[in-house]
Structures are given as C-alpha cells and as structure tokens.
Amino acid sequence: MEYKEIREMTQAELNSLLHDLKEELFSLRFEKTRGNLNNPARFKQLRKDIARVKTVFREKEKESVDQEKG
C-alpha cells in the first residue's frame, strides 16, 4: 500500500484499515506456527503497512488538534 493511497483516507477508514492489517498479521502468526505459511515476506510487508497507517493517522490527528487551537 502506498502513502498516497493512505493519505487520501479519512481517520475512520484508517482506523478500520489498521484493525484489518493487525488481524491479518495475527492470522499469519498462526499460519507460521502450524507450518502453513506460503509467503513469509508478507510479515515484513504487513509491519511496514501498519507503520505507514499509524504515521498518517498520527499526522492527521496532529493536524486536527492544530486546527482546533488556532
């Protein structure tokens, strides 16, 4: 997922996406434990996507606080 796509989302959409990504990461951990993991590189990709979403979510949060102040 690209930053451009993430930045166009609302905070509610970002929150939903973050929840979905975390669920997928949780599922991958179980697949790894069972030995059914097909794409181990997906772990790295998911962790990066989660970090991107959190970064943009925090930026939007700061923007809304700054707008309220002044």
Image: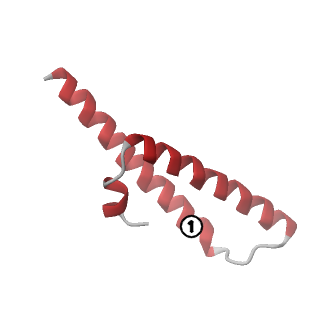
Q: In this view, does 18 lie to the left or right of 39?
A: left
Image point 37% across, 57% down: which residue?
6
In which quadrant is the C terminus drawn?
top left
Q: Is residue 9 left or right of residue 47?
A: left
Picture coordinates of residue 31 (x, y %)? Answer: 79, 65
Give the number of marks. Answer: 1
Residue 59 percent location from the top left of the image: 31, 42
Q: Residue at horizontal 82%, vertical 73%?
A: 36
Residue 62 horizontal/vertical position (percent)? 28, 34
The amino acid sitting under disc 1 is Lys
- Tell me the residue at 20%/29% (across/down): 66
Q: Name the residue under label 1.
A: 44
Q: Which of 40 and 69 is in front in this view?
A: 69
Colour setting:
secondary structure
Between residues 25 and 5, which one lies in front from this camera angle?
5
Secondary structure under the numbered disc 1 in the rendered image: helix
The relative height of residue 4 versus residue 18 in the rendered view (above or below) is below
Q: Quadrant of the N terminus?
A: bottom left
* Residue at horizontal 84 percent and vertical 72 percent from the top: 35
Residue extending furthest toward the left? 70
Answer with left or right where residue 52 lies relative to residue 29: left
Quarter-wise, where is residue 3 in the image? bottom left
Which percent across, then down, holds residue 14? 44, 47
